[in-house]
Image (cartoon, rainbow, N blue to C red):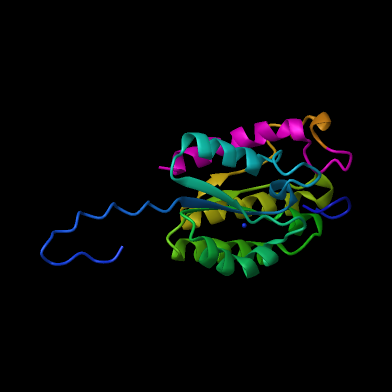
């Protein structure tokens, strides 16, 4: 989401047998997070967001893994779909976390287009041999029952159709606690981020094997 109103020795002679070379260090496998301001940590210090906290946990508990946060405040599914090829090529992730769609919903963009963009991202990630974790959101009821229901249904159906992992609602642990949000009532405060990390980890953790 966006701010209010819109949601990095020479070779030995053959007479002597050279010692076996030490095996090269195995490259770290990566988790690529592509999200909006909820994942970019809008309004927070760099180390406070749920993605940064997840990266700390990964460093401690999952040797050989790292987290790359390619989230952008204000990002839409169209933006994510246009960027994913480059991010996949640059980072070669083993897992791709897609947390997008909230800004589409807040702008009332067509559900079919949002779904197509998310599907494009999922297919690109799977073509790159990456596992996918799709993280959903919910829209405020003032957008209408049909729109809000269709918005949530997009995530469920895409996950089922393409066999991805699914976290239906990122903000579920804090959604009913208004004190967990910044003044804009959209972005969680720093003290709420560990709850989001733990919520995501319940699905992401088992994927990092």
Give the vertical position of 98 relative to 41 (above or below).
below
- 207 in the magenta segment: yes
From where the camera sits, is residue 3 visible?
yes
Q: Is residue 197 left or right of residue 62?
A: right
Magenta span covers which residues?
182-209
Using residue 134 as the reference point, say whether residue 140 is left or right of it.
right
Considering the image in quadrants, where does the C terminus appear? top left
Q: Is residue 89 magenta?
A: no
Q: Residue at x 37, y 51 (%)?
A: 25
Give how far across and how far down residue 186 sits, in percent. Answer: 81, 43
The spot of residue 104 in percent (x, y) is 75, 59
Residue 74: % across, % down = 77, 58
Q: Position of residue 146 (x, y in %)?
A: 74, 53
Q: Residue at coordinates 45% horizontally, 64% vertically from top-left?
A: 128
The furthest residue to the left: 15
Instruction: Answer with the quarter of the image where residue 64 lies.
Output: top left
| Residue at point 52%, 67% (across, down) | 89
* Viewer-nearest residue: 61 or 154: 61
Magenta residues, dominant SS class? helix
Q: In this orientation, which residue lies closer to the viewer: 143 or 81?
A: 81
Vertical side of 116 occupied by 62: above or below: above
- Left or right of residue 69, residue 91 in this image: left
Q: Is residue 202 above or below residue 82?
A: above
Asked whether, in this view, residue 196 is left or right of residue 64, the answer is right
Note whether residue 169 is visible. Answer: no
Choose between 120 and 51: the one closer to the eye.
51
For the image shown, how many numbered marks are present on the structure?
0
């Amino acid at each position: 989401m966006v701010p209010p109103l819109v949601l990095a020795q020479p070779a030995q002679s053959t007479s002597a047998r050279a010692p076996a070379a030490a095996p090269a260090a195995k490259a770290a496998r990566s988790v690529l997070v592509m999200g909006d301001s909820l994942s970019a940590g809008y309004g927070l210090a760099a180390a406070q967001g749920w993605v940064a906290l997840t990266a700390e946990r990964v460093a401690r508990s999952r040797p050989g893994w790292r987290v790359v946060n390619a989230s952008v405040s204000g990002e839409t599914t169209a933006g994510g779909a246009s960027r994913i090829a480059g991010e996949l090529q640059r980072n070669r992730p083993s897992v791709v976390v897609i947390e997008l769609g909230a800004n589409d919903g807040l702008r009332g963009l067509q559900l079919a287009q949002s779904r197509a963009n998310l599907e494009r991202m999922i297919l690109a990630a799977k073509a790159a041999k990456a596992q996918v974790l799709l993280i959903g959101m919910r829209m405020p009821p003032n957008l209408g029952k049909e729109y809000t229901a269709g918005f949530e249904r997009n995530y469920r159906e895409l996950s089922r159709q393409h066999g991805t992992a699914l976290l239906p609602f990122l903000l579920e642990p804090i959604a009913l606690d208004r004190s967990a949000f910044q003044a804009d009532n959209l972005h969680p405060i720093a003290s709420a981020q560990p709850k989001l990390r733990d919520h995501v980890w319940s699905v992401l953790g088992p994927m990092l094997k």
